[in-house]
Image (cartoon, rainbow, N blue to C red):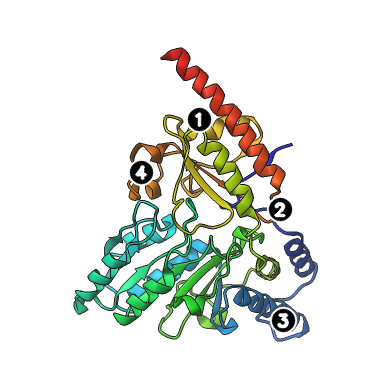
Amino acid sequence: MSVYLDHNATTRVRPEAIAAMTAVMQAVGNPSSIHAAGRTARAAMEQAREQVAALIAAPASTVVFTSGGTEANAIAIESAVAAGAKRLIVSAIEHDSVQETSRVLGVEVEVLPVDADGVADLAWLSERLARWNTADGKPFVAMMLANNEIGVIQPVAEAAEIVRAAEGWLHVDAIQAAGKISVDSRALGADTLSVSAHKIGGPQGVGALTFGPRATLSRRQHGGGQERGRRGGTENLPGISGFGAAAKVAKAGLAAQQACRDAAASRMQAVGSVVMGEAAPRLPNTLCIATPGYTSDLQVMSLDLAGIMISAGSACSSGKVKASPVLSAMGQGELAACAIRVSGGWDTTVADWDRFAEAWLEAYARHSARQKETA
C-alpha cells in the first residue's frame, strides 16, 4: 500500500468537500440569475464565502474567489502596481507565483533576505523602509506566512507594523498556512492575503483573496459584475462550494502531525541528516531535511520505488528536481541539492510517518553501501 506524504503540493479532497460539490453539480442555476434556481446557487456560494472567511478571520464581504492561489497572489501584486507602486520588496523565499508576477510588471524588485533558518530579516526591512523614496510610490512588501518547502512561519505581524509605519501595503501568501495553523488575517495586519482550496482538502482550481481597507483592488479579469465587480466570469460554484466545506472542517488544523514528524526527523538525524529551519517556528506537518552526499533526486526516486511519495521542494516547477532556491537563499550551499520535503495532511496517520522513516533508512543504508563500494 502506498503512502502519500506530499500534501503541501496538493492534498486529498475531503469527503465534506466532495459532498458539497456533488450537491451543487446535481442542481442548476447561475449565481447571477435572479430566479429561484439562481438564488439557490447564490446562497450556496455566499455560504462558502462565509466559511472561507471564517478560516482566515476576515469579513466575508472582503473575500474574492479566484481560480487558485496563483491568481490571488497576482491580483494583489498587480493591484499594488496599478495603485502606483514602482518598487516591490519580495522576500527571498516567496512562492514562484509571487516572484514571477513581481518581475514581469515593469517595476523594480528588491529581495528581502532571510537568515539561515529561513526567517525574514526584519532589521533589513525596517532600515530599507526608513529610507524609502516617495517617488517609488507607497512601499509594497510580499511576505508569506509559512513557506511551502521548509514550513518556517514568518514574523508577519511584526513585519506588518513596520510596513504600516511606512504607509505601505503588505501582501501575505497564507496558502500553506491556512488549515495547518490558526490564521487571522486582520490580527496579522495583512492588507491582502491569499488562500487556496486544494491545500486544505478542497478541489484544485479555486482560491481566494481577502483585502483590508488600505488595499485598492484592480479588476484583473474583465467581463460581468461577478465578485462585486472585482473579477468577471461566472463563478466556479462546485469548486467554491467544495472550498467552503473544506474550510469549515480545516479549522481544526494539523497540530497532531508534529510529534510524528519530529519522531521521523530524529531517526534521520541519527545518521547525519539536517533539519532545515529547525530553530524557527514551523508548520506541524512539514519536514524539510537534507542529507549530505545523498541528492534529492535519488531520495525521491528510491522512496517512490518503495511506494512512498514525497518531493524535493515546491511542486510548481514543471516536475523538475533541482536545488531549492529557498535553501540557497538560506545559505545552505551544497545541502540545497540534498533536501527532501515530507508533508502530512488531514488523512495522514502515525503509521504513514513510521513507514516513511523505515523506507528512508533502508534506502539510505543501500546508498551508503554503494558509496563505500565505489570509494
Q: Quadrant of residue 306?
A: top right
Label at residue 298? 1
Q: Quadrant of residue 133?
A: bottom left
Indicate which label's residue lies in the foreground, 3 or 4. 4
Mark with earlier residue (3, 2) = 3
Q: Secondary structure at mark 3?
A: helix
Q: Secondary structure at mark 1?
A: helix
Q: Can residue 132 be seen in the rendering of this structure?
A: no
Image coords of residue 108 (percent x, y):
25, 64
Indicate which label's residue lies in the foreground, 2 or 4. 4
Amino acid type, label 1: Leu
Dot 4 crowding, Cα within 10 Å, few <14, some 14–19, many 20+ = some
Mark 4 and mark 1: span between their CA atoms? 19 Å
Residue under label 3: 43
Mark 3 and mark 2: span between their CA atoms? 30 Å
Q: Secondary structure at mark 2?
A: loop
Label at residue 347? 2
Label at residue 332? 4
Image coords of residue 32 (percent x, y):
65, 81
Amino acid type, label 2: Asp
